Image (cartoon, grey):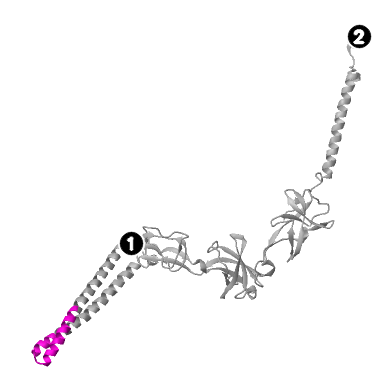
Amino acid sequence: MEKEELSRLKISRGAESPSGYRRWRGKKAAWLSLAAVLVLLLGFLYAQGLLQPAPEVAITTVSLVYPSQPVTALNASGYVVAQRKAAVASKGTGRLEILAVEEGSRVKKGALIARLENADLQAAAAQAQANLSVARANLNQIRAEIKNDRLRFDRYQKLIQSQAIARSDFDATEAKLNQALAAEAASLSQIRAAEAALEAAQVALEYTLIRAPFDGVILTKNADVGEVVAPFGSSVNAKAAVVTMADMASLIVEADVSEINLGKVRVGQSCEITLDAFPNERFPGQVHMIVPTADRSKATVLTKIKFLTMDEKVLPEMSAKVAFLTRPLHPGEKPKVGVNPGALSDKNGILRAFLLNGATVREVPVTKGPPLADLVEITSGLKAGDKVVLQPPQGLQDGSRVKVAEK
């Protein structure tokens, strides 16, 4: 039995069979082909630099160089301020009946801004006007009597010379004429009093009409229809100023200049104004005034710069920066594209720069112009805002991966 069982135990020799050998060779060839492909792929990736560590590079930004930058002697910051600004209030007390403006409304001098309830004052003015009319009518009546009395007096004067009438009749006629003349004088006084009363009533009525003191723009609205308005807000729960307005033609920039730099500033000096709200726009300006006092807490002197050309976009209380120039700018000067000269390199006589494109760089040919202070002008190849490699390392080429150095 043991011999029979041992005879059944055999090692399979299938691999040595023709079909098994072919399968084994096929698998070996497939593995060798795969290995060859991997070697070729790794060689290609290495040649492209994808398996090499990305070099760490510094980045600089291509900027727009304005004509004022090379001739700027000093920079200062400040705010746009209206030199003519008013909190418009009523001189009378009353309930606001009409508000004819809103924020942003442009008004002319004398234009109606608001009106208080004034029915009682209108009635008083009408009564004063009626009293004046009565006084003038009385004067006309008295003057008619004077005319009649003067004719009688002249006639009696001729008759008394010929003694055709009694002396008493002449004296009575003369007295009546004098009485009429006195009544005329009294009537004239009454008319003047009535005119003064009418003027007072009209002034009181005008106090209920709130008008613009100058041409300007409404900045804020401080009261609404139905609220009580009083001079200086003296009444309980009463509003003082109805609106706040400013003359936009009087806008200037007030900037603080350090005492140590005051010698670089003079009245009439050319300036360039930049508003934080519009960083890409430049406004020509001029030093209007250097306030003759210093702020001891800040060691600064307030300087006022006026706009030479006003723009509707300029609004009060905007923050601004002022560049004080060593000379006026020439008309037609335009900003230029500038870059740090360290970002440019020469390759076979062609000037180039490496433009950052995500995690890689792109080689671009550039054309440079004259120096712009510590920058160099770029006439073609780059635009403002582009980020380029500063001091590109050896071996950097188009498509290379880079790592941006942290600042």
**Residue at 38% from the left image edge and 58% from the top image edge:** 225
Secondary structure state at the residue bearing disc 1? loop
The quarter of the displayed image where residue 336 is located: bottom right
Sequence-wise first label, 2 or 1: 2
User: Can the viewer see residue 174?
Assistant: no
Label annotation for residue 218: none
Rendered-image quadrant of the N terminus: top right
The quarter of the displayed image where residue 342 is located: bottom right
**Residue at 14% from the left image edge and 89% from the top image edge:** 157
Q: Position of residue 64 (x, y in %)?
A: 68, 60
> Which amino acid type is shown beneath numbered disc 1?
Glu
Query: Counting other residues with Cα less than 10 Å from the Cα at mark 2, is it few (<14), some (14-19), or many (20 or more)?
Result: few
Q: Nearer the viewer, residue 184 or 241?
A: 184
Main SS, magenta residues: helix
Q: Which residue is mark 1?
A: 117
As drawn, 237 above or below 293: above
Q: Position of residue 320 (x, y in %)?
A: 59, 64
> Which amino acid type is shown beneath numbered disc 2?
Lys
Q: Is residue 162 magenta?
A: yes
As drawn, 57 above or below 119: above
The quarter of the displayed image where residue 327 is located: bottom right
Q: Is residue 302 left or right of residue 15?
A: left
Q: Is residue 12 magenta?
A: no
Query: Counting other residues with Cα less than 10 Å from the Cα at mark 1, is it few (<14), some (14-19), or many (20 or more)?
Result: some
Residue most toward the top?
A: 1
Q: Is residue 310 left or right of residue 162?
A: right
Q: Position of residue 360 (x, y in %)?
A: 76, 48
Q: Position of residue 369 (x, y in %)?
A: 75, 63
Q: Which residues are magenta?
A: 144-173
Q: Which residue is mark 2?
A: 3
